[in-house]
Amino acid sequence: MDLGAEIVLALIGAAMAAGFVDAIAGGGGLITIPALMLAGVPPAGALATNKVQAVFGAATAAIAYARAGHVDLRRQAGAAVLAFAAGLIGSLAISALPTGWLRPVLPVLLIAIAAYFALKRGLTDADRRRRLSPAGFTALVVPVVGLYDGLLGAGAGSFYMLGFVTLAGYGVLKATAHTKLLNFASNLGSLAGFALAGQPLWLIGLAMAAGQVLGASLGARLAMRGGARVIKPLLVVTCTLMAMRLLWDAF
């Protein structure tokens, strides 16, 4: 697909903004998918191309958090592999699995997540009592969210985040760091599935990746500096906007 230089530059700028937001609270696809569709990319191609550039942003954020000591990549390797596999299966099963019933449920779930992070007291960067062991979290939560990421993707980071905070007992910043690692893994698996179907526009996606890397670097830096004070409000806003976008698409 041949796009003009001005459109490509605009897409790179959108990717930079998306990478910044995604590294802190997720929801970067709210920016990049509409931008790709406005540029004339068909919906299926927009979803697949979005995965190309999103992988780079998630990887950049995950590495930044790991370097700062907020996530141990070696200890999380098993969960990342499982998230990759689930994302791959989800993307390959899009045409085989019914997902229509999920679409009216998603806005409700996202609004509930926004309300939880907005109203729940005591959500700080300090760890809390966990309700699931690390092995239990990996076995029960990771494959479900990873599969969803491959199937639909909208809000997957918010679901990882909610799981880490409510079930694993992580503080907000630590949960964000671990979310970015698993988001990267399930995004990569999903991208592999889209690649097998030949849907991504690779040149556009790789051009946008440059913006993603820069935006994610800045976003991760701000999140680590501000912690829960920065992450929680942006998470509430992105969840609410995602819910509104899904309702708009539905009606």
Image (cartoon, helix red, strand yellow):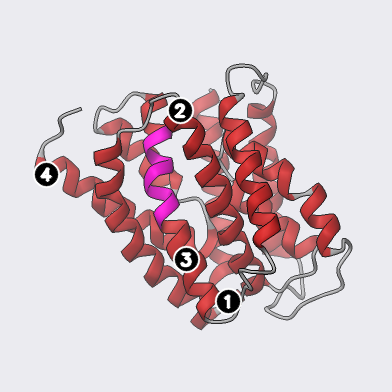
Front residue of 71 and 212: 71
On screen, residue 13 versus residue 237, left or right, reads left
Q: Residue at x 64, y 41 (%)?
A: 85
Residue position marked by numbered label 2 in the rendering:
196
Residue position marked by numbered label 1 in the rendering:
229
Q: Say if mark 4 contacts mark 3, CB within 8 Å.
A: no
Near mark 4 (Cα within 10 A), the count class, few <14, some 14-19 or many ≥20, is few
On screen, residue 180 versus residue 9, left or right, reads right
Q: Amino acid at mark 4?
A: Glu
Residue 239 position (above or below residue 144): below
Mark 3 lies on a secondary structure that is helix
Q: Which residues are magenta?
A: 48-56
Spatial CA distance of label 3 from label 2 is: 26 Å
Q: Amino acid at mark 3?
A: Ala
Spatial CA distance of label 4 from label 3 is: 27 Å
- Mark 4 or 1: in front is 4
Front residue of 164 and 117: 164
Image location (x, y in percent) of residue 4? 11, 37
N-terminal label among 4 and 3:
4
Q: Say if mark 2 contacts mark 1, CB within 8 Å.
A: no
Q: Residue at x 50, y 46 (%)?
A: 188
Near mark 3 (Cα within 10 A), the count class, few <14, some 14-19 or many ≥20, is many
Residue position marked by numbered label 4 in the rendering:
6
Q: Residue at x 53, y 53 (%)?
A: 184
Residue position marked by numbered label 3 in the rendering:
61
Find residue 74 and report its image quarter.
bottom right
Q: Amino acid at mark 1?
A: Arg
Prevalent SS, magenta region: helix
